[in-house]
Image (tube, grey):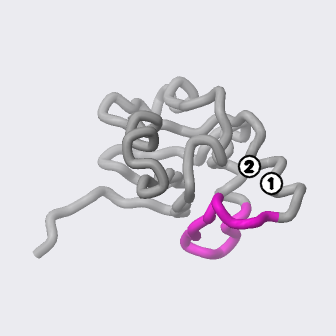
């Protein structure tokens, strides 16, 4: 869908990836597996609650190579099962090819209605 929107909207389209380390999404969300980029983003956050990584800006070469390398990221959708976390992923591309920015959150909680 993102590819279609980018083709249709051109430079007006921005793709934002959301990654998270752990918490609850109505069911427990385990820490990401070490072979998922989510694990690296989790480690990079340190003591911060999260951060935004703008993939369109100039990056040091070692970081740029990492962002352009093929990777795996956790894909949480309506059929996500935390008991089989490894089965729910997107792979075959790179963060830089999938997204314009990544928003990483260390700990998530279930959504709730606003008052």
Q: CA distance from mark 2 to mark 1?
A: 5 Å
Q: Nearer the viewer, residue 1 or 63?
A: 1
Viewport quadrant of the C terminus? bottom left
- Disc on res. 80: none
Left or right of residue 6, residue 100 in this image: right
Quarter of the N terminus within the rendering = top left
Which residue occupies the foreground of this view, 109 or 59?
59
Q: Residues within 10 Å of mark 2 (few under 14, many from 20)?
A: some
Q: Which residue is mark 1?
A: 64
* Residue 42: percent from left, percent from top: 65, 57
Residue furthest to the left:
115
Q: Secondary structure at mark 1?
A: helix
Q: Is residue 63 left or right of residue 95?
A: right
Q: Is residue 72 magenta?
A: no
Whether 10 is drawn above or below 48: the answer is above
Q: Residues within 10 Å of mark 1 (few under 14, many from 20)?
A: some
The stretch of residues the image draws in magenta is: 44-59
Q: On screen, 101 above or below 71?
A: below
**Residue sitting at 79 percent across and 64 percent down?**
59
Quickly name the residue at label 2.
67
Say if mark 2 contacts mark 1, CB within 8 Å.
yes
Percent of width and height locating residue 97: 63, 42
Q: Quadrant of residue 51?
A: bottom right
């Amino acid at each position: 869908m993102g590819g279609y929107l980018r083709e249709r909207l051109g430079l007006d389209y921005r793709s934002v990836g959301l990654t998270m380390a752990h918490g609850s999404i109505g069911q427990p969300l385990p820490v990401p597996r070490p072979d998922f980029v989510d694990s690296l983003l989790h480690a990079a956050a340190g003591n911060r609650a999260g951060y935004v990584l703008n993939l369109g800006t100039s990056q040091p070469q070692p970081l740029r190579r990492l962002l352009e390398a093929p990777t795996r990221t956790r894909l949480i959708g309506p059929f996500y099962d935390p008991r089989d976390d490894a089965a729910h992923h997107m792979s075959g591309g790179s963060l830089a090819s999938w997204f314009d920015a990544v928003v990483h959150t260390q700990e998530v909680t279930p959504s709730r209605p606003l008052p």
